Protein backbone atom coordinates (compact mmCIF):
# COMPACT_ATOMS: atom_id res chain seq x y z
CA UNK A 1 0.00 0.00 0.00
CA UNK A 2 1.37 3.45 -0.93
CA UNK A 3 1.92 5.77 2.02
CA UNK A 4 -0.22 8.89 1.87
CA UNK A 5 0.90 12.01 3.73
CA UNK A 6 -2.00 13.91 5.26
CA UNK A 7 -2.62 17.62 4.89
CA UNK A 8 -3.37 18.31 8.55
CA UNK A 9 -4.53 21.85 7.85
CA UNK A 10 -7.43 20.43 5.83
CA UNK A 11 -8.30 17.96 8.56
CA UNK A 12 -8.32 20.92 10.91
CA UNK A 13 -5.52 19.70 13.15
CA UNK A 14 -2.36 21.79 13.59
CA UNK A 15 1.02 20.54 12.44
CA UNK A 16 3.05 18.48 14.86
CA UNK A 17 5.21 21.44 15.81
CA UNK A 18 2.20 23.19 17.31
CA UNK A 19 1.07 20.34 19.58
CA UNK A 20 2.46 21.82 22.85
CA UNK A 21 0.88 25.20 22.08
CA UNK A 22 -2.48 23.60 21.32
CA UNK A 23 -2.31 21.50 24.48
CA UNK A 24 -1.70 24.61 26.55
CA UNK A 25 -4.57 26.48 24.92
CA UNK A 26 -6.92 23.58 25.42
CA UNK A 27 -6.01 23.54 29.09
CA UNK A 28 -6.98 27.22 29.29
CA UNK A 29 -10.28 26.77 27.44
CA UNK A 30 -13.29 28.31 29.08
CA UNK A 31 -16.53 28.80 27.17
CA UNK A 32 -19.00 31.36 28.51
CA UNK A 33 -22.63 30.26 28.70
CA UNK A 34 -25.13 32.09 26.55
CA UNK A 35 -28.88 31.75 26.28
CA UNK A 36 -30.22 29.55 23.47
CA UNK A 37 -31.16 31.38 20.26
CA UNK A 38 -34.47 33.18 20.54
CA UNK A 39 -36.02 31.69 17.41
CA UNK A 40 -38.65 29.02 17.92
CA UNK A 41 -37.94 25.47 16.76
CA UNK A 42 -40.70 23.92 14.62
CA UNK A 43 -41.82 20.49 15.84
CA UNK A 44 -42.58 17.36 13.86
CA UNK A 45 -43.83 13.81 14.39
CA UNK A 46 -40.63 11.79 14.74
CA UNK A 47 -40.32 8.06 14.12
CA UNK A 48 -37.66 7.20 16.69
CA UNK A 49 -36.90 3.89 14.97
CA UNK A 50 -35.55 5.80 11.95
CA UNK A 51 -32.84 7.99 13.47
CA UNK A 52 -29.35 7.58 11.95
CA UNK A 53 -26.17 9.63 11.53
CA UNK A 54 -23.36 10.16 9.04
CA UNK A 55 -20.37 12.42 8.54
CA UNK A 56 -17.24 13.19 6.57
CA UNK A 57 -13.72 13.48 8.06
CA UNK A 58 -14.05 15.07 11.52
CA UNK A 59 -17.81 14.73 10.99
CA UNK A 60 -17.31 11.00 10.48
CA UNK A 61 -15.55 10.82 13.84
CA UNK A 62 -18.46 12.75 15.35
CA UNK A 63 -20.97 10.40 13.72
CA UNK A 64 -19.44 7.29 15.26
CA UNK A 65 -19.21 9.07 18.65
CA UNK A 66 -22.92 9.91 18.46
CA UNK A 67 -23.79 6.39 17.31
CA UNK A 68 -21.88 4.57 20.04
CA UNK A 69 -22.64 6.99 22.88
CA UNK A 70 -26.36 7.34 22.05
CA UNK A 71 -27.13 3.89 20.68
CA UNK A 72 -30.58 3.80 22.29
CA UNK A 73 -31.54 6.67 20.00
CA UNK A 74 -29.27 6.28 16.96
CA UNK A 75 -29.81 3.15 14.85
CA UNK A 76 -26.98 3.22 12.32
CA UNK A 77 -24.06 5.24 11.01
CA UNK A 78 -22.18 6.04 7.82
CA UNK A 79 -18.66 7.43 7.70
CA UNK A 80 -16.60 8.98 4.92
CA UNK A 81 -12.88 9.23 5.77
CA UNK A 82 -13.35 8.44 9.45
CA UNK A 83 -12.02 6.04 12.03
CA UNK A 84 -13.10 4.01 15.05
CA UNK A 85 -14.87 5.37 18.11
CA UNK A 86 -12.60 7.20 20.57
CA UNK A 87 -9.64 6.76 18.24
CA UNK A 88 -7.60 9.65 19.67
CA UNK A 89 -8.34 8.60 23.29
CA UNK A 90 -8.25 12.27 24.28
CA UNK A 91 -4.63 12.49 23.12
CA UNK A 92 -3.44 15.10 20.63
CA UNK A 93 -0.37 13.01 19.90
CA UNK A 94 -2.44 9.98 18.94
CA UNK A 95 -4.96 12.09 17.06
CA UNK A 96 -2.18 13.64 14.98
CA UNK A 97 -0.49 10.27 14.53
CA UNK A 98 -2.13 6.94 13.69
CA UNK A 99 -5.69 8.35 13.79
CA UNK A 100 -4.84 10.33 10.65
CA UNK A 101 -1.65 8.86 9.20
CA UNK A 102 -2.62 5.22 9.60
CA UNK A 103 -0.96 2.43 11.51
CA UNK A 104 -2.01 0.62 14.66
CA UNK A 105 -4.68 2.55 16.60
CA UNK A 106 -5.19 -0.22 19.17
CA UNK A 107 -8.68 -1.37 18.23
CA UNK A 108 -8.97 -3.83 21.12
CA UNK A 109 -8.26 -1.06 23.64
CA UNK A 110 -10.94 1.10 22.02
CA UNK A 111 -13.40 -1.79 22.24
CA UNK A 112 -12.51 -2.27 25.91
CA UNK A 113 -13.08 1.44 26.54
CA UNK A 114 -16.51 1.30 24.89
CA UNK A 115 -17.47 -1.75 26.95
CA UNK A 116 -16.32 -0.20 30.24
CA UNK A 117 -18.07 3.07 29.37
CA UNK A 118 -21.22 1.09 28.65
CA UNK A 119 -20.98 -0.67 32.02
CA UNK A 120 -20.49 2.65 33.84
CA UNK A 121 -23.40 4.27 32.02
CA UNK A 122 -21.39 7.05 30.41
CA UNK A 123 -22.55 5.69 27.04
CA UNK A 124 -25.63 3.63 26.23
CA UNK A 125 -25.51 -0.17 26.38
CA UNK A 126 -23.32 -1.38 23.52
CA UNK A 127 -25.72 -4.29 23.05
CA UNK A 128 -27.97 -1.79 21.26
CA UNK A 129 -25.47 -1.73 18.39
CA UNK A 130 -25.75 -5.40 17.43
CA UNK A 131 -28.28 -5.06 14.61
CA UNK A 132 -27.33 -1.57 13.43
CA UNK A 133 -26.20 -0.96 9.84
CA UNK A 134 -22.76 0.61 9.37
CA UNK A 135 -21.43 2.00 6.05
CA UNK A 136 -17.76 2.98 5.66
CA UNK A 137 -16.11 4.85 2.77
CA UNK A 138 -12.48 5.59 1.98
CA UNK A 139 -11.62 7.34 -1.30
CA UNK A 140 -8.85 5.70 -3.31
CA UNK A 141 -7.18 9.10 -3.73
CA UNK A 142 -7.64 10.34 -0.16
CA UNK A 143 -4.29 11.89 0.79
CA UNK A 144 -5.50 13.15 4.18
CA UNK A 145 -7.05 10.31 6.18
CA UNK A 146 -5.33 6.98 5.58
CA UNK A 147 -7.28 3.94 4.44
CA UNK A 148 -6.12 2.18 7.63
CA UNK A 149 -8.66 4.21 9.60
CA UNK A 150 -11.63 2.70 7.77
CA UNK A 151 -10.06 -0.74 8.27
CA UNK A 152 -9.83 0.03 12.00
CA UNK A 153 -13.45 1.26 12.11
CA UNK A 154 -14.52 -1.97 10.43
CA UNK A 155 -12.61 -4.02 13.01
CA UNK A 156 -13.98 -1.95 15.90
CA UNK A 157 -17.64 -2.54 14.99
CA UNK A 158 -16.98 -6.20 14.26
CA UNK A 159 -15.19 -6.83 17.56
CA UNK A 160 -17.56 -4.75 19.69
CA UNK A 161 -20.93 -5.80 18.30
CA UNK A 162 -20.43 -8.50 15.67
CA UNK A 163 -21.40 -6.04 12.92
CA UNK A 164 -20.19 -6.58 9.36
CA UNK A 165 -20.06 -3.06 7.92
CA UNK A 166 -20.46 -2.27 4.24
CA UNK A 167 -17.04 -1.02 3.13
CA UNK A 168 -16.55 1.03 -0.06
CA UNK A 169 -12.93 1.76 -0.96
CA UNK A 170 -12.81 1.45 -4.75
CA UNK A 171 -14.03 4.92 -5.77
CA UNK A 172 -11.30 7.22 -7.12
CA UNK A 173 -12.24 10.11 -4.85
CA UNK A 174 -10.01 12.51 -2.87
CA UNK A 175 -10.57 13.68 0.70
CA UNK A 176 -14.09 15.05 0.52
CA UNK A 177 -17.73 14.10 0.03
CA UNK A 178 -18.37 12.35 -3.33
CA UNK A 179 -21.47 13.45 -5.26
CA UNK A 180 -23.03 12.79 -8.63
CA UNK A 181 -22.24 16.20 -10.09
CA UNK A 182 -21.93 18.86 -7.36
CA UNK A 183 -18.76 20.53 -6.19
CA UNK A 184 -15.21 20.50 -7.49
CA UNK A 185 -13.88 17.96 -9.96
CA UNK A 186 -13.30 14.47 -8.67
CA UNK A 187 -9.54 15.02 -8.63
CA UNK A 188 -9.55 18.31 -6.70
CA UNK A 189 -9.47 18.89 -2.97
CA UNK A 190 -10.93 22.34 -2.47
CA UNK A 191 -13.85 24.08 -0.81
CA UNK A 192 -16.63 23.18 -0.41
CA UNK A 193 -15.03 19.69 -0.24
CA UNK A 194 -17.78 18.18 -2.37
CA UNK A 195 -16.46 16.25 -5.36
CA UNK A 196 -18.31 15.51 -8.59
CA UNK A 197 -17.22 11.87 -8.88
CA UNK A 198 -20.38 10.51 -10.53
CA UNK A 199 -20.92 8.71 -7.22
CA UNK A 200 -23.92 9.40 -5.01
CA UNK A 201 -22.40 8.86 -1.57
CA UNK A 202 -25.49 10.23 0.18
CA UNK A 203 -27.74 7.81 -1.67
CA UNK A 204 -25.46 4.83 -1.15
CA UNK A 205 -25.16 5.40 2.57
CA UNK A 206 -28.88 6.06 3.03
CA UNK A 207 -29.67 2.88 1.11
CA UNK A 208 -27.47 0.96 3.56
CA UNK A 209 -29.06 2.62 6.58
CA UNK A 210 -32.66 2.33 5.33
CA UNK A 211 -33.17 -0.94 3.40
CA UNK A 212 -36.64 0.13 2.21
CA UNK A 213 -35.36 3.38 0.69
CA UNK A 214 -37.45 4.70 -2.19
CA UNK A 215 -35.85 6.29 -5.31
CA UNK A 216 -34.52 9.83 -5.03
CA UNK A 217 -36.76 12.70 -6.03
CA UNK A 218 -36.59 16.46 -6.37
CA UNK A 219 -36.17 18.90 -3.50
CA UNK A 220 -39.25 21.09 -3.14
CA UNK A 221 -38.64 22.70 0.26
CA UNK A 222 -36.25 25.39 1.46
CA UNK A 223 -33.66 24.77 4.14
CA UNK A 224 -34.65 25.83 7.64
CA UNK A 225 -32.45 27.35 10.32
CA UNK A 226 -32.88 25.41 13.57
CA UNK A 227 -31.59 26.77 16.91
CA UNK A 228 -28.88 24.68 18.58
CA UNK A 229 -29.55 24.96 22.35
CA UNK A 230 -26.58 26.28 24.35
CA UNK A 231 -24.41 25.94 21.27
CA UNK A 232 -21.74 28.39 22.41
CA UNK A 233 -20.94 26.19 25.40
CA UNK A 234 -19.90 23.49 22.94
CA UNK A 235 -18.11 25.72 20.40
CA UNK A 236 -21.01 25.42 17.97
CA UNK A 237 -22.83 27.98 15.84
CA UNK A 238 -26.21 29.32 17.01
CA UNK A 239 -28.19 27.53 14.30
CA UNK A 240 -28.18 24.22 12.49
CA UNK A 241 -29.65 23.76 9.02
CA UNK A 242 -32.40 21.28 8.24
CA UNK A 243 -34.21 19.94 5.20
CA UNK A 244 -37.81 19.01 6.05
CA UNK A 245 -39.82 17.22 3.34
CA UNK A 246 -43.35 18.34 2.58
CA UNK A 247 -44.84 15.17 4.09
CA UNK A 248 -43.06 15.86 7.38
CA UNK A 249 -44.26 19.46 7.40
CA UNK A 250 -47.77 18.14 6.82
CA UNK A 251 -47.67 16.02 9.97
CA UNK A 252 -46.63 12.56 8.76
CA UNK A 253 -44.25 10.61 10.99
CA UNK A 254 -40.69 11.03 9.74
CA UNK A 255 -37.25 9.73 10.57
CA UNK A 256 -34.24 11.96 11.11
CA UNK A 257 -30.80 11.60 9.58
CA UNK A 258 -28.08 13.75 11.16
CA UNK A 259 -25.35 14.74 8.67
CA UNK A 260 -22.12 16.07 10.21
CA UNK A 261 -20.07 18.31 7.93
CA UNK A 262 -16.29 18.10 7.81
CA UNK A 263 -13.66 20.70 8.66
CA UNK A 264 -14.07 23.99 6.77
CA UNK A 265 -17.48 22.77 5.62
CA UNK A 266 -19.81 24.49 8.10
CA UNK A 267 -22.06 27.40 7.19
CA UNK A 268 -19.31 29.68 8.54
CA UNK A 269 -17.07 28.62 5.64
CA UNK A 270 -19.32 27.51 2.77
CA UNK A 271 -22.76 28.89 3.63
CA UNK A 272 -25.48 26.32 2.97
CA UNK A 273 -23.64 24.59 0.11
CA UNK A 274 -22.97 21.34 1.98
CA UNK A 275 -26.59 21.15 3.12
CA UNK A 276 -27.94 21.91 -0.36
CA UNK A 277 -25.50 20.05 -2.58
CA UNK A 278 -24.23 16.92 -0.78
CA UNK A 279 -27.19 14.91 -2.14
CA UNK A 280 -29.11 13.97 1.01
CA UNK A 281 -32.18 16.12 0.42
CA UNK A 282 -33.31 14.46 -2.80
CA UNK A 283 -33.55 11.16 -0.94
CA UNK A 284 -35.14 12.79 2.08
CA UNK A 285 -38.09 14.14 0.12
CA UNK A 286 -39.24 10.72 -1.11
CA UNK A 287 -38.48 8.86 2.13
CA UNK A 288 -39.98 10.97 4.89
CA UNK A 289 -36.56 11.82 6.31
CA UNK A 290 -35.68 15.08 7.98
CA UNK A 291 -32.00 15.84 7.39
CA UNK A 292 -30.43 17.77 10.26
CA UNK A 293 -27.12 19.52 9.53
CA UNK A 294 -25.56 20.53 12.89
CA UNK A 295 -22.97 23.29 12.68
CA UNK A 296 -19.74 23.60 14.63
CA UNK A 297 -17.95 26.91 15.17
CA UNK A 298 -14.31 27.70 14.52
CA UNK A 299 -12.05 29.30 17.09
CA UNK A 300 -8.48 30.51 17.07
CA UNK A 301 -7.88 30.47 20.81
CA UNK A 302 -9.14 28.49 23.81
CA UNK A 303 -9.85 26.09 22.21
CA UNK A 304 -7.78 26.32 19.04
CA UNK A 305 -9.97 24.98 16.25
CA UNK A 306 -9.48 27.36 13.31
CA UNK A 307 -10.87 24.96 10.71
CA UNK A 308 -14.17 24.40 12.49
CA UNK A 309 -13.70 20.65 13.07
CA UNK A 310 -15.89 18.52 15.29
CA UNK A 311 -14.33 17.48 18.59
CA UNK A 312 -12.83 14.03 18.15
CA UNK A 313 -9.73 14.58 20.29
CA UNK A 314 -11.04 16.34 23.40
CA UNK A 315 -10.99 20.10 22.94
CA UNK A 316 -14.38 20.44 24.67
CA UNK A 317 -13.40 18.25 27.63
CA UNK A 318 -12.50 14.71 28.67
CA UNK A 319 -16.06 13.44 28.22
CA UNK A 320 -16.31 14.50 24.55
CA UNK A 321 -17.16 10.98 23.29
CA UNK A 322 -19.77 10.16 25.95
CA UNK A 323 -23.46 10.90 26.38
CA UNK A 324 -22.54 14.00 28.37
CA UNK A 325 -20.08 15.29 25.77
CA UNK A 326 -20.84 18.94 25.06
CA UNK A 327 -21.36 18.62 21.31
CA UNK A 328 -23.29 15.37 21.59
CA UNK A 329 -25.50 17.05 24.19
CA UNK A 330 -26.28 19.96 21.85
CA UNK A 331 -27.18 17.68 18.96
CA UNK A 332 -29.40 15.58 21.22
CA UNK A 333 -31.12 18.73 22.52
CA UNK A 334 -31.70 19.88 18.94
CA UNK A 335 -33.31 16.53 18.08
CA UNK A 336 -35.50 16.80 21.19
CA UNK A 337 -36.55 20.29 20.14
CA UNK A 338 -37.53 19.07 16.67
CA UNK A 339 -39.65 16.33 18.27
CA UNK A 340 -41.13 18.66 20.87
CA UNK A 341 -40.27 16.13 23.55
CA UNK A 342 -37.35 14.22 25.05
CA UNK A 343 -36.49 11.40 22.68
Image (tube, grey):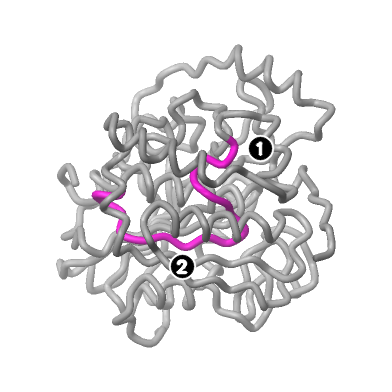
The answer to which quarter of the image holds residue 121 is top left
Q: Does the magenta stretch include residue 107?
A: no
SS class of the residue under badge 2? loop
User: At x 61% / y 53%, what residue is drawn?
Assistant: 57
Highlighted magenta segment, given as a residue range: 71-88
The numbered dot on residue 165 is: 2
Residue bearing mark 1? 95
Q: How far apart are marks 1 and 2 (CA)?
A: 23 Å
The numbered dot on residue 317 is: none
Expressed as whole percent of the image width and height from the top left, the position of residue 269 reads 64, 48
Q: Can residue 5 be seen in this view?
A: yes
Expressed as whole percent of the image width and height from the top left, the position of residue 155 reads 52, 57
Expressed as whole percent of the image width and height from the top left, the position of residue 342 reads 17, 42
**191 or 156, which is in the foreground?**
156
The answer to whether marks 1 and 2 mark residues whose Cβ atoms lie closer than 8 Å is: no
Q: Which of marks 1 and 2 is in front?
A: 2
Outermost residue to the bottom: 215
Q: Is residue 86 magenta?
A: yes
Q: Is residue 188 above or below residue 122?
A: below
The answer to which quarter of the image holds residue 283 is bottom left
Q: Horizontally, is 293 left or right of 170 in the view?
A: left
Amino acid sequence: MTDRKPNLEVVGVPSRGHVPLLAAMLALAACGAEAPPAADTPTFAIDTNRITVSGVSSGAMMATQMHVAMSELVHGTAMIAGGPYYCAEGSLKKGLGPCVNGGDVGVSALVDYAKSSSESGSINDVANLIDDPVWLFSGKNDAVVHHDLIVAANAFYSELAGITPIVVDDVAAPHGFPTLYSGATCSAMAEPFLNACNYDAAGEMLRALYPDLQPRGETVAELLEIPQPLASDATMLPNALAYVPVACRDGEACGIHVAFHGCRQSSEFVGDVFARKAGYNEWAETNRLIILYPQVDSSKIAPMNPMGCWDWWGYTGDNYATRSGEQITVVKATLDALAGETL
